[in-house]
Image (cartoon, helix red, strand yellow):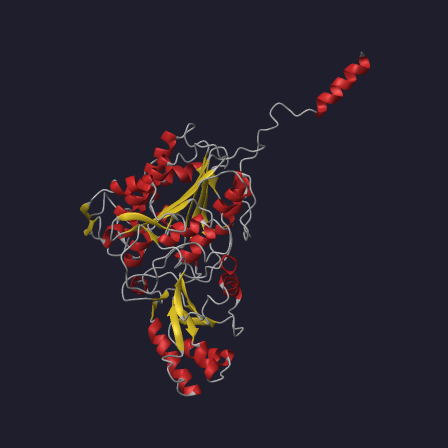
């Protein structure tokens, strides 16, 4: 009997524990990723006293809040920013260095999410413009958090929502069930055949479009301001109406985005299905649209931040009410895709050196210098510069080849010409082995992608930017463009607090895959933000 007892005890040690099927760590039922386009790091700090209890204030108080999250990019803008957030990769890996580039084979500009094989759904009227209407993630090389949830076989559902097509598509990655974006002319949410091969919108999207409110209003400031919006702080009045372009350049755009996120969450029962984890990514694009026009020191941008506070609170409260355990099993990741500088004219008022750079004028300067050095262009060639965008210059390789001019030699001439202009700090060129010192060189290595980045790229002096005579552009790796907040919230997953540690935007993706039980995205090189994780 004693021998039998010993055997039974020994065998019992080999048997699985009663709860061996329980995961070692809890996993969220829903990952809600919130991106605010052009969301500078200081907005949460400057306007904190005006926030309500359930939006930014809730996330800042209950989440791991990194005030200084950083992009490591040479040029901070929407396409590379959104491509980086859920891939955990830099542009040299994920393939999206800027918003648009020039294809030397097709001799045409390429939009970051352009795909002629994926026309819009529903079919849109033909438009004149630089890019076709087809959209997909085909130009993105890396995988995303959503892709890896799918690849793990979890049956996760991945949906993305943004007014901008590029924001929704690049957050979703290759395997998203659906990415939707807004057509302001038709005042409806649309997608493409990449996601909807039948060419038909799903019923929930038809219901969403039918429910879009027809709003005609004048956008005014609400309540007493913070006192920190010091440029043109007098009350403003901007007319807005659904179905017109200006509607999404106002809080109406935020309200439309939140409504679409609610519809997706409700109609698809996200976070309440059999999959361990679903993902819903929402990007608020109106902040950027208004920011370009008025700049970060305007009262308009303060009011837009308050608009997002209200809409995020509305979305969180809606999810809290519908999830069985409220927000206990929901992880919320909030960040921006880039920041923004002061308007040069405003900077000059404060005796800060600043100015504007005219890209077309610089293209003409390159033309003049190359013609003076190498003679007239070959027949049928119009310019030595094929394309210029966002301080990237693409030389005419066909013309150079026809005259047997080495590319490096042409770049050297163009570089000298550009560096002579006011506001230009450095001109870099990977083809010519021309770099810039320190942090600039690191940013260049992370940002450059062969055949997509320009032959030459200008690094302007601080507060110098390409663009018109009023608004702002964000084309640099300076602190005002690269620094954004990062907040990770989830009662079972993260330790609440304000974190001064360095956090990079590329750290968001591996942190989310760690808590959801899958591998990081294919090209991720971020770290898990382990200091913010709750131990178990």
**Farthest residue, direction front:** 198
Measuring 75% from the left and 18% from the top, which residue is drawn there? 8
Left-right relation of 239 to 37: left
Q: Position of residue 345 (x, y in %)?
A: 29, 64
Query: 182 or 455, which is in the foreground?
Result: 182
Q: Position of residue 368 (x, y in %)?
A: 37, 83
Q: Position of residue 516 (x, y in %)?
A: 52, 39
Left-right relation of 44 to 531: left
Measuring 38% from the left and 60% from the top, which residue is drawn there? 474
Left-right relation of 342 to 73: left
Q: Is residue 33 visible?
A: no
Measuring 32% from the left and 64% from the top, which residue is drawn there? 344
Quadrant including the C terminus: top right
Q: Is residue 31 visible?
A: yes
Q: Position of residue 347 (x, y in %)?
A: 32, 63
Measuring 39% from the left and 71% from the top, which residue is drawn there? 387
Q: Is residue 199 above or below residue 28?
A: below
Q: Count the marks: how many?
A: 0
Looking at the rendering, which quadrant does residue 325 occupy?
Answer: top left
Quadrant including the N terminus: top right
**Farthest residue, direction top:** 1
């Amino acid at each position: 009997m004693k021998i039998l007892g010993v055997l039974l005890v020994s065998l019992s040690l080999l048997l699985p524990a009663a709860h061996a099927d329980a995961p070692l760590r809890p996993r969220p039922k829903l990952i809600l990723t919130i991106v605010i386009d052009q969301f500078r790091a200081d907005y949460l700090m400057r306007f904190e006293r005006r926030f309500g209890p359930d939006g930014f204030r809730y996330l800042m108080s209950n989440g791991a809040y990194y005030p200084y999250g950083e992009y490591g990019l040479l040029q901070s803008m929407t396409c590379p920013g959104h491509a980086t957030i859920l891939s955990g990769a830099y542009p040299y890996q994920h393939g999206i260095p800027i918003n648009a580039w020039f294809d030397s084979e097709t001799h045409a500009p390429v939009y970051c999410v352009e795909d002629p094989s994926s026309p819009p759904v529903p079919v849109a009227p033909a438009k004149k413009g630089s890019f076709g209407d087809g959209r997909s993630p085909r130009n993105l090389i890396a995988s995303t958090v959503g892709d890896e949830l799918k690849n793990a076989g979890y049956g996760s559902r991945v949906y993305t929502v943004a007014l901008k097509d590029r924001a929704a598509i690049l957050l979703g990655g290759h395997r998203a069930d659906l990415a939707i974006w807004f057509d302001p002319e038709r005042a409806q949410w649309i997608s493409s055949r990449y996601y909807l091969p039948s060419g038909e919108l799903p019923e929930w999207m038809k219901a969403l479009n039918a429910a879009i409110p027809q709003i005609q209003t004048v956008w005014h400031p609400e309540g007493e301001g913070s006192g920190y919006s010091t440029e043109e702080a007098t009350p403003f009045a901007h007319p807005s109406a659904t179905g017109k372009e200006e509607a999404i350049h106002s809080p109406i755009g935020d309200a439309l985005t939140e409504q679409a996120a609610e519809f997706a969450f409700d109609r698809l029962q996200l976070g309440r299905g059999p999959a361990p984890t679903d993902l819903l990514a929402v990007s608020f694009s109106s902040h950027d649209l208004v920011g370009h026009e008025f700049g970060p020191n305007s009262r308009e941008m303060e009011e837009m931040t308050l608009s997002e506070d209200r809409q995020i609170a509305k979305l969180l409260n809606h999810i809290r009410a519908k999830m069985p355990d409220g927000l206990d099993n929901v992880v919320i990741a909030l960040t921006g895709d880039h920041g923004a500088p002061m308007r040069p004219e405003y900077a000059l008022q404060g005796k800060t050196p600043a100015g504007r750079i005219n890209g077309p004028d610089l293209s003409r300067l390159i033309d003049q210098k190359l013609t003076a050095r190498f003679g007239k262009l070959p027949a049928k060639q119009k310019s030595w510069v094929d394309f210029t965008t966002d301080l990237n210059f693409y030389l005419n390789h066909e013309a150079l080849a026809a005259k047997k001019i080495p590319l490096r030699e042409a770049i050297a001439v163009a570089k000298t010409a550009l560096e002579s202009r006011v506001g230009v700090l450095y001109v870099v060129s990977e083809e010519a082995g021309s770099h810039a010192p320190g942090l600039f060189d690191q940013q260049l290595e992370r940002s450059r992608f062969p055949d997509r980045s320009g032959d030459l790229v200008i690094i302007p002096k601080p507060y110098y930017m390409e663009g018109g005579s009023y608004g702002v552009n964000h084309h640099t790796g300076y602190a005002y463009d690269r620094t954004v907040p990062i907040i990770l919230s989830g009662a079972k997953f993260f330790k609440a607090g304000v974190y001064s540690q360095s956090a990079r935007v590329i750290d968001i993706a591996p942190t989310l895959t760690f808590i959801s039980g899958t591998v990081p995205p294919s090209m991720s090189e971020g770290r898990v933000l382990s200091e913010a994780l709750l131990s178990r």
